[in-house]
Amino acid sequence: MISLKQAYEILFSQSLQLQIEEVNAFESLGRILAEDILATINLPAFSNSAMDGYVVSEIKESYKITHTILAGEIPPHSIPQGECYKIMTGAKVPNNALAVIPFENANLQGEKMSPAMKVKSGANIKLEGEEYKKGEILLRAGEKLTYRNLSLIASTGITTLKVFLPLKIGIYSSGDEVVELGEMIGEQQIYNINALAYHSTLRTYGFSPKYQGIIRDDLQSIQKEIENFKNFDVIFTSGGASVGEADFFEQALILAGAEILFHGINLKPGRPMLVAKLNQTYIFSLPGNPLSGLLNLITLAIPTLYKLSGSTAYSPTPTKAKNKTSFVLKSGRSNMILGSFDGEYFEAYRGGKYGSGAILPIKESNALAIFDECFECVEDEENIKILSLPFVMDQENSWMNLRK
C-alpha cells in the first residue's frame, strides 16, 4: 500500500504518445493545443481611436473641425496645425495624432471644438502592437482552448489549429450482483450506479467516455474482455479492486502482461484502488462502493487524464476556506471529506461521519477537502484548502491540506 502523495507522483509521471490533428478553430473548443501559437500580426494592427471623438495633434484651447475619419477608412497622413478631425471608435489615427477627445468632453461652436477637460498626451489612443507584437508566443502547447483563448486566436486571423486527439476512454462495471438500469432487480442485487456516475463525471470534465457493459466475476470473462482494452487509451472499471474481489482482475491483468503501478492507497474513502498499464492502455480499477469510486475518479483519475491528454494544467485549483464546525479524522492515513462551501465557510457533511457506500453525500455536497496522514482533528475557524466541485485545473497547485 502506498501513500496518497506517492499515488499522485506515480500517476503524474505517466504519459501517452498522443496523435495530433488539425481542426477548424470553430470546432476546437475544449481541445488541447499541440503547438505554440505565435502572433501573425501586431495587435492592434495599427494605432486607432478607443472612443468616438475628436483627434488632435497638439494641445490648444480650440480647434477647427475639418474632416471625419470612419472605421475602415484610410485617414489623412497628418493633422494640420490648429485643426482636428472627427473620428469613430476603431478608426486609424493620423501619424501625428496626440490624443482623442471624447464627444462628451468637447464643446462645439459652429465648426470649432473646445476641450472641456485637460488634454492628456496619448489619451484614448490604442497604439499599434500595445497588446502583443508579431512573432510573440500567445499560447503554448498544452493549453486548453477556452472561449478566452479562442478570442485571442481570432485576433490573429488563424483559422486552423493543431490539437491532440482526445483520449479514448472505456467504462466497465463488474460484479455478478450488478444489474443494468431498467432491468428487473432481484434479491441481493444492486443497480449499476457507478457506470452512469463515472460517465457523467467524465463528461462534466470534458471527456467523452464509452460505456462497455458489465464484466462478470470469473477469470475467463475478465481475460476475454481484457483483449478489448487495446481499443482505448484509458479503461475504468468499478468493483474488483478490493482484497478478495481483486484476485481475478489483478490476476487476469498480470497474465495479460500488464504492469501493476500500484494497488491500494492509504486513504479513506478509496483505499482499494488499482492502477495498471497494459501496453499503451492505462487501467483504473476503482472501488465498487459508489462514494469511494467516485471520489477516487474525481481526485486521482481526472487530474491524471488531463496530464495524459497533453495538458500542462492538471492540478486542481484549491480555494481557501474556514472550517465551520470541528470534526475528527483518523490519523495515519489521508482523508477525503465532502461538505458544503458558502463562499467563506466549509462544513463537513454530517461531521465526516458517513459510509463509503453512501450516495447522498455526493448529491448534498459542493466541495471536498483532502487531508494528509497527520490530521487528527480540524478545528472551528481553522483555515483549510478545499476543492469546489467541479474544480478547474491550473499549473503546479498544492490542493492537499498538510500538517507538519
Image (spheres, grey):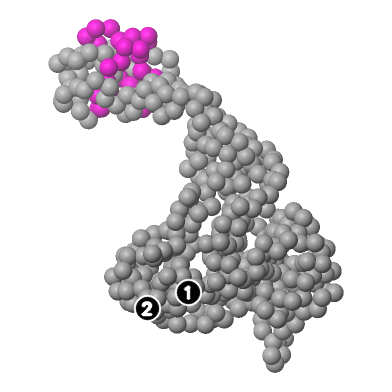
Quadrant housing the N terminus: bottom right
Task: Say left or right for 230 vs 151.
Answer: right
Residue 239 appearing in the image:
no
**Percent coordinates x, y for residue 155 in the rendering:** 50, 31
Depth order, front residue of 137/81: 137
Task: Say left or right for 113 vs 50.
Answer: left
Q: Check disc 2 and report its element: helix, strand or loop.
A: strand
Q: Which mark is residue 186?
A: none
Depth order, front residue of 78/37: 37
Prevailing secondary structure class for the magenta stretch in the rendered image: loop
Above/below status of 47 relative to 188? above
Image-quadrant location for residue 25:
top right
Q: Which residue is mark 2?
A: 327
Q: Which residue is mark 1?
A: 332
Above/below status of 13 relative to 339? above
Let me know if residue 296 is in the magenta part.
no
Residue 40 appearing in the image:
yes
**Percent coordinates x, y for residue 163 in the rendering:** 64, 41
- Residue at (65% x, 69% y) in the render: 263
Q: CA distance from mark 1 to mark 2?
A: 16 Å
- What residue occupies the far top of the structure in this picture? 80
- Residue at (42% x, 70% y) in the render: 374
Q: Amino acid at mark 1?
A: Gly
Tag count: 2
- Residue at (49% x, 73% y) in the render: 333
Above/below status of 266 relative to 38? below
Region rendered in magenta: 76-103
**Percent coordinates x, y for residue 106 in the rendering:** 20, 25
